[in-house]
């Protein structure tokens, strides 16, 4: 099985190149045009990503994340999310690497087979880095109108956290 999987990419590349030759496409020209479009897309996305990284570092270094966790702890208890998971739930919408660090810390303290470890795993798998995804999408497409997109995406993240906690509690 592993040998077949390792052959997939080379076979795919050969098929694409063969198809391009069959269709008489100038492969080098198409490649350089695609690279130029990719670079221009990167230039348009870079300011949003830089602002996002700075905001994440500010949240982490200033202690705002801890303050949010303390503030929302009673609400989380009400809906069944363990308080140890709250920093992960808050950071997951903002940063994939930041939430991965929090996830790793949770698994260091609580085993992966514990209730808290399972809930953290489900949250990591069922929620999205919302602000990163939205900033990249809206910067790349130059679309406007985040009015409904952000609340709906955050509601989806909240739903993933609540339902994940609920399912882990009863399974």
Image (cartoon, rainbow, N blue to C red):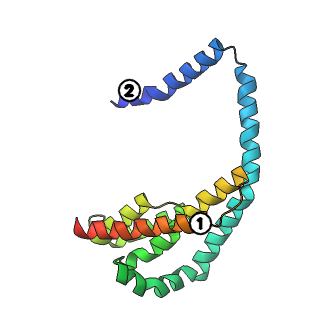
Q: Position of residue 105 (x, y in %)?
A: 42, 70
Residue corresponding to mark 2: 4
Q: Position of residue 74 (x, y in %)?
A: 40, 87
Residue 168 found in image quarter: bottom left
Q: Which one is in front in this view, the residue at disc 1 or the one at disc 2? A: 1
Question: Which numbered marker is on residue 150?
Answer: 1
Q: What residue sits 36% from the left and 31% below the top? A: 2
Residue 13 found in image quarter: top right
Above or below: residue 168 compared with residue 2: below
Residue 103 visible (yes or no):
yes
Q: Position of residue 166 (x, y in %)?
A: 30, 70
Residue 130 found in image quarter: bottom right
Q: Quadrant of the N terminus?
A: top left
Above or below: residue 118 compared with residue 82: above
User: CA gap, disc 1 to disc 2?
Assistant: 41 Å
Q: Secondary structure at mark 2?
A: helix
Give 145 or 75, whichever is nearer the viewer. Answer: 145
Give 39 or 130, whichever is nearer the viewer. Answer: 130
**How would you rate the neighbour count of disc 1 (Cα within 10 Å): few for under 14, some for 14-19, many for 20 or more?**
some
Q: Work out whether mark 1 precedes mark 2 in sequence or the reverse, and give the earlier one.
A: 2
Q: What residue sits 77% from the left and 45% below the top? A: 40
């Amino acid at each position: 099985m592993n040998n077949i999987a390792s052959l997939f990419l080379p076979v795919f590349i050969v098929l694409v190149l063969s198809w391009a030759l069959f269709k008489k496409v100038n492969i080098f020209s198409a490649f350089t045009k695609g690279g130029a479009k990719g670079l221009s897309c990167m230039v348009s996305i870079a300011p949003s990503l830089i602002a996002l990284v700075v905001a994440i570092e500010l949240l982490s270094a200033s202690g705002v994340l801890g303050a949010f966790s303390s503030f929302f702890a009673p609400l989380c208890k009400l809906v069944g999310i363990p308080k140890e998971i709250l920093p992960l739930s808050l950071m997951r919408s903002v940063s994939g690497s930041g939430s991965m660090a929090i996830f790793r810390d949770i698994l260091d303290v609580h085993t992966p087979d514990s209730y808290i470890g399972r809930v953290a795993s489900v949250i990591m798998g069922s929620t999205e880095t919302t602000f990163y995804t939205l900033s990249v999408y809206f910067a790349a497409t130059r679309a406007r109108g985040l009015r409904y997109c952000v609340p709906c995406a955050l509601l989806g993240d909240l739903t993933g956290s609540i339902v994940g906690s609920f399912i882990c509690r009863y399974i």
